[in-house]
Image (cartoon, helix red, strand yellow):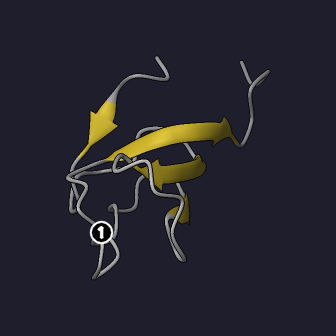
Amino acid sequence: MKQTEQWKPGEIVEESGIYACDCGKEHLWSKSTDVRGHRFPPLPYDCAGQAWTLRTQAHPEEG
């Protein structure tokens, strides 16, 4: 999975990990820990972003 890929709120999480909103502000609640198979949550209420991006994989060496 590429670091530049983006997912919209409500889409299915393909890979467990820590995701951040794409607005770049690093505001409160800008990161979300998401589990594979679940849906991405809404973005924070004050976020100008439009999608989630993967920041840290939960199981990078899983295979």
Q: Between 39 and 33, which is closer to the camera in this rendering?
A: 33
Q: Between 9 and 36, which is closer to the camera in this rendering?
A: 9
Q: In this figure, which residue is indicated by the disc labeled 1? A: 47
Q: Between 1 and 45, which is closer to the camera in this rendering?
A: 45
The amino acid type of the residue labelled 1 equals Cys
Asked whether, in this view, residue 5 is left or right of residue 55, the answer is left
Question: Residue at (74%, 26%) from the top-left corner?
Answer: 60
In the depicted structure, whether residue 7 falls above or below residue 1: below
Question: Residue at (71%, 18%) from the top-left corner?
Answer: 63
In the image, farthest residue toward the right: 61
Q: Residues within 10 Å of mark 1 (few under 14, many from 20)?
A: some
Number of numbered discs on residues: 1
Question: Residue at (40%, 22%) from the top-left corner?
Answer: 4
Q: Position of residue 46 (x, y in %)?
A: 29, 79
Q: Between 43 and 58, which is closer to the camera in this rendering?
A: 43
Look at the image and tell me whether residue 36 can be seen: no
In the depicted structure, whether residue 45 falls above or below residue 37: below
Q: Position of residue 45 (x, y in %)?
A: 28, 82
Asked whether, in this view, residue 45 is left or right of residue 34, the answer is left
In the image, farthest residue toward the front: 25
Could you tell me which secondary element the residue under label 1 belongs to?
loop
Q: Position of residue 30 (x, y in %)?
A: 49, 65
In the image, farthest residue toward the bottom: 45
Question: Residue at (67%, 39%) from the top-left corner?
Answer: 56
Look at the image and tell me whether residue 37 can be seen: yes
In the depicted structure, whether residue 30 falls above or below residue 63: below
